[in-house]
Structure formats: C-alpha cells, structure tokens
Amino acid sequence: MAHPKEERTLIILKPDAVHRGIMGEVINRFERKGLKIIGMKMMQLEDAVLEAHYAHIADKPFFGGIKAFMKQSPVVVMALSGIGAVDATRIIVGPTKGFEAAAGTIRGDFSLSVQSNLVHASDNIENATAEVTRFFKEDELFDYKRNDFEFVNAEEVF
C-alpha cells in the first residue's frame, strides 16, 4: 500500500447478486470509484467460515437462516484497496436495509430487503483486516498501480 491512508477491505457478493446476474454491475461500481481489486475469487462458503464471519450474531435466532442463505450458491469475495476504502465501500453499498438505501447506492438501486441485500462490506478497519485475512491468503493478494488513478500531491490533499 503506497499511501498512509490506503486501507484494505472485504466485499462479499452474496447469493442474490450471483443469482440475479448483477455481479459485473456491482464490481464496476467499486472500480469506477477508484478502488483496486487486489484479490477476487468465487467460492462456496462452509459452516466454519460462516460461523467465524458472523460470530457476532451466531447466538441470534435468525443466524440459521442467514447461514442457509449464504450457502445457497457460490459467492464472490473481493479484497479492495484504496484511500479510506472501508468508508468508501460502505457509502457505495448503502445501509443494510435495502428499503432505506438511497438511489445510487448498490442496495438502493437493487434491493428492498434486509437479508437479500446483495453485498457484505466490512464495517470498520479492524474487521476489514480480520475479514480479508479470513478469506484470502497473502499470496492471493496483489499490489499493482492503477493506470487511471494516481496520488498526485497526496501530502497536500491529505
């Protein structure tokens, strides 16, 4: 990571994004913002990963439904990098409840649901670090320079 404010974050394209065939549209929104995809893969989520990822709600009565939903089909996991990546992705994604999300956000444009809200986005830098590590080995993450985005006079801006 070339800039001191550059962060890594995790995005999961959930089964509803896969089923609806809008993965490309969702991915495009992160790329258009200027975020780098430093890792991406399709995978079938196993119980152990879901239990670790959702440990904060594992004792809730609705957890079984979330687990079943997340296992319906493969998901796409992406590690993104950029300045303020965690907050930037949360803005692009919109609030968890799709019916509350503003037009122009992923959830605002494509979701009316709480569970079928298309994507997971890390909610803070600590969780982002843990989540990227949970889903990616270090040799599955790549550092490269985007040709269309450069930190010009970054010290003056930040």
Image: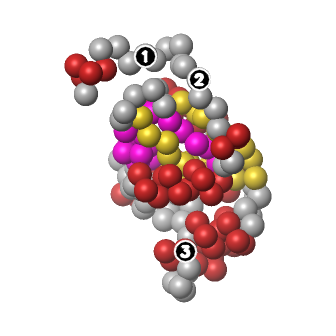
- Between marks 2 and 3, how big is the CA–CA gap? 33 Å
Helix, strand or loop at label 3? It is helix
Q: Quadrant of residue 144?
A: top right
Answer few, some or many: residues within 10 Å of disc 3's Cα (few below 14, many 20 plus, some between 14 and 19): few
* Image mark count: 3
x, y percentage for residue 136? 66, 49
Question: In percent of the image, x 69 and y 48: which residue is there?
Answer: 137
In which quadrant is the C terminus drawn? top left
Residue 32: in magenta span: no
Alpha carbon distance from label 1 to label 2 = 12 Å
Q: Nearer the viewer, residue 39 or 27?
A: 39
Left-right relation of 63 to 137: left
Give the numbered dot on residue 49. Answer: none
Tell me the amino acid under the disc marked 3. Ala
Task: Report the residue marked by disc 1.
Answer: 150
Residue 126: horizontal and vertical position, in percent? 43, 56
Query: What percent of the width, then of the height, locates residue 31?
Result: 53, 29
- Say above or below: 97 vs 78: below
- Considering only order in the chain, which callout, 1 or 3, is on the residue closer to the N terminus? 3
The reply, left or right, for residue 42 in relation to residue 12 is right
Q: Residue at x 54, y 48 (%)?
A: 10
Picture quadrant where residue 104 is located: top left
Residue on which the image places disc 3: 55
Task: Check residue 144 in the rendering and tell me which mark sits there, or answer none.
Answer: 2
User: In the image, what residue type sits under mark 2?
Assistant: Tyr
Answer few, some or many: residues within 10 Å of disc 2's Cα (few below 14, many 20 plus, some between 14 and 19). few
